[in-house]
Image: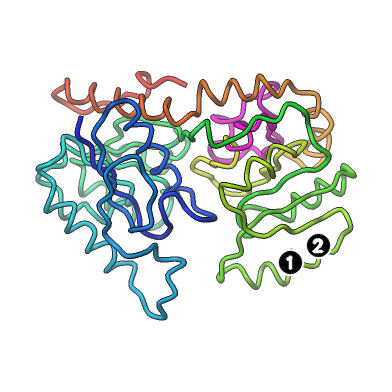
Amino acid sequence: MRIAQVSPLYEAVPPRFYGGTERVVAHLTDALVDLGHEVTLFASAEARTKGQLAAVRSEAIRLDPAPLKSDLAAHMNALAQVRARSDEFDLIHFHTDMIHFPFFSHMAERTLTTLHGRLDMKDVSEVYAHWRDYPLVSISDHQRLPMLGANWAGTVHHGMDADLYRFHPEPGEYLAFLGRISPEKRPDRAIQIAIGAGVPLQMAAKIDPADRDYYEGRIRPLMEHPLVTFVGEIGDAEKSHFLGRARALLFPIDWPEPFGLVMIEAMACGTPVIAYDCGSVPEVVEPGLTGLIVRSLDQAIAAVDAVGRYDRRAIRDRFEARFSARAMARRYVALHETRSAQSTPQDLSYVLGA
């Protein structure tokens, strides 16, 4: 099958540091190539891929040093290039939310659009109601809740390249927090859990300009505790070491997380997850096997000791079965092939499995 993968342009593919969607696109593209498909990746020029790269911008937007830049113009230019080559592909797979809708409606049946973000924002549901011809893919069933009536083709959980993460058979001596310093990620909870459990916490996190005041006013003072170490933003090369040597990953979110890549990155290293019961968490974490789902600070503190006794090989095995890039790629291919064989769209989550 000839497939176009259309990535957003905010981060490199894969990202140099923080970045979820572009990381998934990178791993999905490579896995599809490994399965024998002909894949063209539309992304910024520094992308690293097993597919054919169609460079649509000189570099990704976030780390581009240009003082003035337009993310809207960048994506419009990219979509123009995809449209010019659209006849070359059997499937055009968009990861760009909704921006492509006005330009590809005459070929919507040859597309998939994976939605990577939250869907409970004002005006969003009206867009998907207007352009109903586009088959949509959710990254968790929970993500769909604000738009249950949309044209859902299926749910495909994210996957990552298994070879990128090194298995660590023994638990380490610290807890890990990996992500962004932002109110919805609740780094304050992570610090409270570590202090309550009396276990060191290492925090590898990005600080966006929009969250700088939150960091300075709320989080930085908490980091002065002797159990807390701030590592800063890290990339893929450092993740196996950082996550694999941890006793557990703390995922104390306070928002409807559509998926949460860091949870499966930890599992790939054999590291259990302690996560608050929000968003996609119950679809990702299997209590008693890959981690624990908690609803209070006391439960989270108690979980630190409990998950230290988990079978880390079993955690890695569940990652490979459920969340490897190859498993993700196979589910996307099955979804497209099943849709192509049917005359009317329908929900195919049952085809994809867990």
Which residue is at the far bottom? 67
Task: Reply above or below: 43 against 50.
Answer: below
Mark 1, Cα crowd under 10 Å, few <14 / some 14-19 / many 20+, is some
| Quadrant housing residue 298 | top right
Asked if disc 1 and disc 2 are in contact, CB closer than 8 Å, the reply is yes
Residues drawn in magenta: 265-294
Question: At x 63% / y 71%, what residue is drawn?
Answer: 212
What type is the residue that disc 2 sits on?
Leu
> Residue 24 vs residue 286: left or right?
left
What type is the residue that disc 1 sits on?
Arg
Give the secondary structure at mark 2.
helix
Q: Name the residue that disc number 2 marks.
A: 222
Tell me if residue 270 can be seen.
yes
Task: Reply above or below: 57 against 289.
Answer: below
Q: Position of residue 238 (x, y in %)?
A: 63, 48
Tell me if residue 292 can be seen.
no
> Residue 322 vs residue 81: left or right?
right
Q: Position of residue 281 (x, y in %)?
A: 58, 35
| Quadrant housing residue 252 | top right
Give the secondary structure at mark 1.
helix
Mark 2, Cα crowd under 10 Å, few <14 / some 14-19 / many 20+, is some
Q: Name the residue that disc number 1 marks.
A: 218
